[in-house]
């Protein structure tokens, strides 16, 4: 039995774990980020699955779907599973939906967790097409800069190299540091594994835009 198995089984015997869950969150460590699945929740931490290379005593940061940030330390690692101890035990309330803890002034038009990725994205509509810079990605959509605005068009076809082609509803216009931006909400979101593999593979920079067809 290795150290990870020993510590995981020790937690089971201790009765510390309170509930089995299946929650999706963002995880960041060592300058990398991606999605993770939270499988078990206790008053002091979580057990999660992640593609990121984690080691015991690593500090990590989780971003929940509420937008809240939770910091913790890796207690054990077994394959792609890891036990995380919260820096602040009170953060356990953020996972249970306690209304007082879920209040936040920060609102994202494409929800959370958010991932910063840069590169070209092609948008197509019945009125034309354009290649625009990608700024942010979430499981629910993307934010792009310098957006084209085609009057009367409410759904665009979005081509993201290495991920897939999606239909996306036109969301909010906003101002960001990069200038004018537009949120686009996926009609059918990408699968968890496909999006996570893409986030991991492309780090913070995505590849070239798809080649134009028929030109």
Image: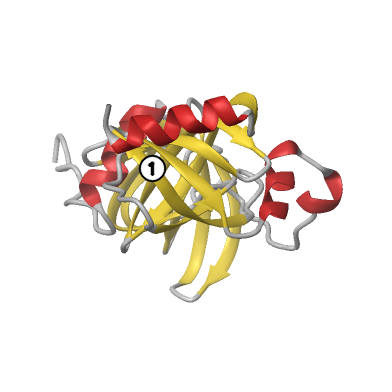
Query: Which residue occupies 64% across, 55% down?
Result: 68
Query: Which residue occupies 56% across, 47% down?
Result: 112
Q: Can you give x and y, in whole percent of width and height, for residue 118 in the image? A: 31, 60
Furthest-right residue in this view: 100
Q: Residues within 10 Å of mark 1 (few under 14, many from 20)?
A: many
Q: Is residue 79 left or right of residue 98?
A: left
Q: Is residue 49 left or right of residue 131?
A: right
128, above or below 8, in the image: below
Q: Quadrant of the C terminus?
A: top left
Q: Secondary structure at mark 1?
A: strand
Say which of 163 and 60 sits in front.
Answer: 60
Label 1 sits on residue: 76
Picture quarter containing residue 87?
Answer: bottom right
Furthest-bottom residue in this view: 177
Residue 137 seen by the camera:
no
Query: Which residue occupies 49% across, 35% down?
Result: 47
Q: Can you give x and y, in whole percent of width and height, for residue 138 in the image? A: 47, 45
Q: Is residue 167 left or right of residue 174?
A: left
Say which of 32 and 139 sits in front.
Answer: 32
């Amino acid at each position: 039995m290795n150290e990870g198995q020993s510590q995981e089984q020790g937690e089971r015997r201790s009765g510390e774990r309170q509930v089995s869950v299946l929650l999706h969150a963002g995880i960041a460590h060592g300058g990398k980020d991606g999605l993770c699945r939270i499988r078990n929740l206790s008053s002091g931490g979580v057990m999660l699955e992640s593609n990121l290379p984690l080691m015991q005593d690593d500090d990590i940061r989780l971003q929940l779907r509420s937008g809240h940030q939770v910091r913790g330390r890796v207690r054990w690692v077994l394959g792609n599973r890891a036990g995380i101890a919260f820096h602040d035990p009170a953060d356990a309330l953020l996972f249970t939906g306690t209304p007082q803890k879920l209040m936040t002034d920060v609102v994202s038009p494409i929800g959370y967790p958010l991932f910063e990725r840069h590169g070209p994205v092609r948008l197509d509509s019945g009125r034309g097409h354009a290649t625009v810079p990608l700024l942010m990605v979430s499981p629910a959509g993307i934010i792009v800069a310098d957006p084209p605005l085609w009057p009367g068009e409410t759904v665009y076809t979005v081509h993201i190299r290495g991920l897939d082609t999606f239909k996306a509803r036109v969301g909010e216009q906003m101002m960001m540091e990069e200038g004018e931006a537009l949120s686009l909400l996926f009609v059918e979101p990408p699968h968890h594994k496909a999006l996570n593999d893409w986030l991991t593979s492309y780090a913070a920079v995505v590849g070239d835009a798809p080649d134009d067809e028929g030109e």
